[in-house]
Amino acid sequence: MAVLDSAPQPDASQPISTAEPQGEAPLVRRVTCPHCWQAFRPEEILWVAEHEDLAGDRLLPEEPLRFLPTRFNLDSLAIDPRGMVCHTMACPQCHLTIPRVLLENEVTFFSLIGSVGSGKSNFLAAMTWQLRQQLARHFRIIFSDGDKESNWVLNHYEETLFLPDDPDRLTLLEKTRTQGDLYRSVRLHGQQTQLPKPFLFAIHPAADHPYAAQRRRAGTILCMYDNAGEHYGVGQDSSLTPVTRHLGHAKVLMYLFDPTQDPRFRERCKAISSDPQITESLQTVRQETVLGEAAIRLRKHRGLSAYQRYDRPLLVLVAKSDIWGSLLDVDTTTDPITLPPEGHGQMAAVDVPRIQQVSRKLRELLLQIAPEIVTVAEDFCNDVTYIPVSALGHSPQRHPEQAGLLIRPRDIRPRWVTAPILYAFARWQAGLIPAVQAASVPTKA
């Protein structure tokens, strides 16, 4: 099994210099706000006043004034109209705060689509928790919060599932609501508008990565969102609630399909699983309509005809593979990462051929059980990959005194949750993560 170069290769269209420039870090040419997706030049960014007299912004009346500065101190920090040094920046359109790192690195948007109750929050929490560890351990890459304030909800998800005080106490993540902590309300264009809060992560080479000397040029900011499933319903996209319009800015689209919401999958799995999501009568959802609605919105906002396929890749993530994975004759328990021989000093590599071969087998399974998922996905995008994932890796259970299906944190064993991001970076974000050149799909023992 050969690996495509022990060190990753940079994007030939954007060569990386041998060392970072000295002095002040250069800024990106254009900044994209992760709240309202407005693009602007770095010199147009607003600053947030520090003086207590400068309270009451015109778009955010309960917050300090946003202003375009004319004075700076020797550290290039803006000085507000009352002479106070400022440390926080904001978008010139929506006035919501933006971390400085967005001025120094490009943003890579990943959009996650899914129906109500499909497990998007569990998946995001498991994915980011595993990425923090796998990228450092296997790929010498730092995966850190780009903005603690924006990420606190997702950090709470991670702590609930993976760092509980009592790992044997049953728990669950609350359903994502259509309003609340994951959204901000701001007055735009004369009307009160609801915008989603982004999850921002800085990705850059660690000290022992081949590109350590170019950590800024080789890095990026990963931006994701946790929309409520209701927001993908018909008629839920408007100028007052444009909370899913990040779809048009995404480099990669991810669609989470939950087989336990499909009666045909539940019937196929009754012979192989006693999971309550299979054996009990739970909700049934027409999930292809969610993906179809996302396609309609994206075509509308990008000016595409109803017959045009989108030119960005789509990853169809088939959730809860711990339940149905034995329907495939391949291993979906071990992550698609190839480790180097001990003592060789090389990095691991993403097993792209294995992911692609599993994708073909999973596509065949979907065509047998839920063919409309494949039809809608491939009518939407030119490049579609099917990936099995499991955020929890074990069955939830009921508690006699609590409603709903609960999770025992000690039993959580995520499967393939990092595969979508690793695969995307290995294929479409050259420069950080190497890929396996040739591989075979391991069969089940």
Image: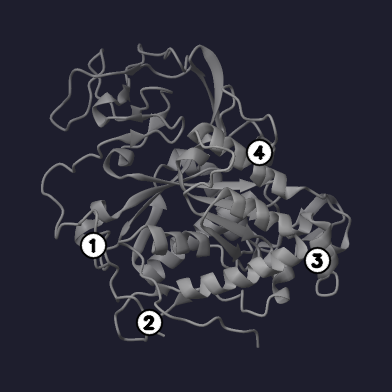
In the image, which is nearer the foreground, mark 4 or mark 3?
A: 4
Q: What is the CA distance from the residue labelled 2 to the residue labelled 3?
A: 37 Å
Disc sitting over residue 275 in the figure: 3
Q: Are marks 2 and 3 in contact (CB under 8 Å)?
A: no
Badge 2: few (under 14), some or many (20 or more) residues near its Cα, within 10 Å? Answer: some
Q: What is the CA distance from the residue labelled 4 to the residue labelled 1?
A: 40 Å
Q: Are marks 4 and 3 in contact (CB under 8 Å)?
A: no
Tell me what residue is drawn at x 70 percent, y 69 percent: 365
Residue on which the image places disc 2: 340
Badge 1: few (under 14), some or many (20 or more) residues near its Cα, within 10 Å? Answer: many
Q: Are marks 4 and 2 in contact (CB under 8 Å)?
A: no
Q: What is the CA distance from the residue labelled 1 to the residue labelled 2?
A: 20 Å
Residue on which the image places disc 4: 232
Badge 4: few (under 14), some or many (20 or more) residues near its Cα, within 10 Å? Answer: many
Residue on which the image places disc 1: 212
Q: What is the CA distance from the residue labelled 4 to the residue labelled 2?
A: 42 Å
Question: Dividing the picture into quarters, in which one does residue 174 lie?
Answer: top right
Q: What is the CA distance from the residue labelled 4 to the residue labelled 3?
A: 28 Å
In the image, which is nearer the foreground, mark 4 or mark 1?
A: 4
Disc 4 marks a residue whose amino acid type is: Tyr
Q: Nearer the viewer, residue 72 or 241?
A: 241
Q: Is residue 351 above or below residue 236?
A: below
Secondary structure of residue under mark 1: helix
Q: Is residue 368 left or right of residue 433?
A: right
Residue 344 percent coordinates (x, y): 30, 84
